[in-house]
Image: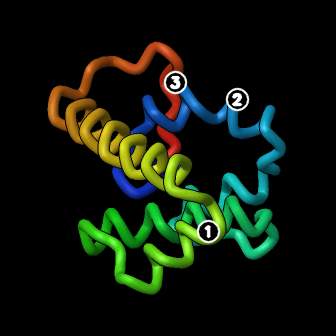
C-alpha cells in the first residue's frame, strides 16, 4: 500500500486494498498511507516494513542502521522478500502509470 500510494497507482491500490483490510489494516490507516504518512498505530513489524519501503523508494537503498534494524527484527529472509516485493511493485506501478491501462477495479472512481 505504501508503494501504491507513493506512485499514486490506482490499480495497485484497488487490487491490494481488500487484502490489506483482511490482514487487519484499518480504514483510517489506509487513509493515512494513501496520504503519504505511516500510521502510528501499526504493529511494530508493519511500521518497520513501511518505513523501510519509504527509505528504499527515497534513497534506493537502506542505511546501515536501517539494514541492521531490519535484520534484527525481520530476519534475512523476510528482509530479502521485502526488498524484492518493493522492487517488483515499484516496477509494476511505474509500468501502470506509463501505459495507463483502464482500471476495471476502479469503476470510474479516482482515489488520488
x, y percent for residue 111: 52, 43
- In primary-sequence order, the first of circles 1 and 3 is 1
Is disc 3 placed on a helix, strand or loop? loop
Q: Position of residue 77 (x, y in %)?
A: 52, 47
Which residue: 41% across, 20% down? 103
- What residue do we see at 58% from left, 32% from top? 16
Residue under label 1:
48
In the drawing, does residue 31 fall left or right of residue 62? Answer: right
Q: Sequence order check: which comes first, mark 2 or mark 3?
A: 2
Q: Nearer the viewer, mark 1 or mark 3?
A: 1
Kind of element beneath mark 2: helix
Position in image of residue 95 (x %, y %): 21, 33
Residue with the mark numbered 3: 106
The colouring scheme, among rainbow, by chain, secondary structure or one colour, is rainbow
| For the residues bearing labels 2 and 3, Cβ distance under 8 angstroms | no
* CA gap, disc 1 and disc 3: 29 Å
Above or below residue 106? Residue 34 is below
The answer for how far apart the CA atoms under marks 2 and 3 are is: 13 Å
The residue carrying mark 2 is 18
Vertical arrangement, residue 34 with respect to residue 104, above or below: below
Counting every numbered tag in the picture gives 3
Amino acid at each position: 500500500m505504501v508503494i501504491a500510494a507513493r506512485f499514486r497507482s490506482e490499480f495497485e491500490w484497488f487490487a491490494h486494498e481488500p487484502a490489506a483490510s483482511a490482514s487487519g489494516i484499518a480504514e483510517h490507516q489506509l487513509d493515512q498511507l494513501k496520504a503519504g504518512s505511516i500510521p502510528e498505530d501499526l504493529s511494530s513489524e508493519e511500521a518497520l516494513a513501511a518505513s523501510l519501503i519509504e527509505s528504499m523508494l527515497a534513497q534506493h537503498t537502506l542505511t546501515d542502521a536501517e539494514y541492521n534494524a531490519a535484520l534484527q527484527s525481520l530476519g534475512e529472509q523476510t528482509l530479502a522478500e521485502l526488498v524484492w516485493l518493493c522492487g517488483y511493485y515499484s516496477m509494476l506501478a511505474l509500468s501502470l502509470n506509463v501505459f495507463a491501462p483502464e482500471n476495471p477495479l476502479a469503476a470510474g472512481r479516482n482515489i488520488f
